[in-house]
Image: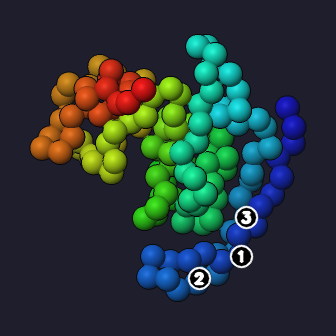
Amino acid sequence: TTSPELTTKPEMTMPNGTMRPTNMTFLASTTTPWSAQETTNSTQCEDLNSGAEDLLGFNCSFYVGKPALCNSLDDQDFSAGSMCCACGGGSIGCTNLDNGAKNLLGFDCSNYKGNEILCSFLDDEDFTATSMCCPCGGGST
């Protein structure tokens, strides 16, 4: 393993466009992200953020090894849970089709990974896990 480095984010852009000093220091992972490792079916997970960053300006690589932070820093154009392999999102030969839709409890497709038993129980008007979510047999390949 490699030693992590400290990353300081001196300011952040608030949703209304103003800048706010944060004086926060984050521990950035320097290990190889899951997206660069082979999976058991010889395909790779691909992060889907396409340059988008979270509320503090981090991309998907920041979340590797930090599952507790997944979705906690999401903003209008960034959703770690659906975009980042480290958070159960990304693409491994299948793309979730929820496109911002949420289930009855307010969760998207990324929350079904490891919770597949719930695939048929939390649907609502605009969300059907079995057709939208890869872990539930839906999505697009």
- Say above or below: 99 vs 39: below
Q: Which amino acid does label 3 sit on?
A: Thr
Left or right: where does residue 43 sit relative to residue 127? right
Residue at 70 percent of width and 27 percent of height: 37
Pick whichever of labels 3 and 2 is earlier in the sequence.
Answer: 2
Q: What residue type is labelled 1?
A: Pro
Q: What element carries label 2?
A: strand
Q: Residue 87 placed where, x, y %?
A: 53, 39
- The answer to which of 110 and 26 lies nearer the viewer is 110
Residue at 43 percent of width and 64 percent of height: 76
Q: Residue 92 placed where, x, y %?
A: 53, 28
Q: So how many labels did they put on this image?
A: 3
**Residue where numbered disc 3 is placed:** 25
Q: Residue 107 placed where, x, y %?
A: 31, 43
Whether residue 115 is visible here, answered yes or no, is: no
Residue at 66 percent of width and 50 percent of height: 62
- The answer to which of 12 and 47 lies nearer the viewer is 47
Instruction: Report how far apart the C-alphas of labels 1 and 2 lie in the structure.
Output: 9 Å
Within the image, what quadrant is residue 115 found in? top left
Question: Are there few (<14), some (14-19), or many (20+) residues within 10 Å of tag 3?
Answer: few
Left or right: where does residue 37 sit relative to residue 15? right
Q: What element carries label 1?
A: strand
**Residue where numbered disc 1 is placed:** 10
Question: Are there few (<14), some (14-19), or many (20+) residues within 10 Å of tag 2?
Answer: few
Q: In which quarter of the image is the N terminus?
A: top right
Within the image, what quadrant is residue 135 found in? top left
Tag shown at residue 18: none
**Residue where numbered disc 2 is placed:** 20
Q: What residue type is labelled 2?
A: Arg
Residue at 50 percent of width and 26 percent of height: 93
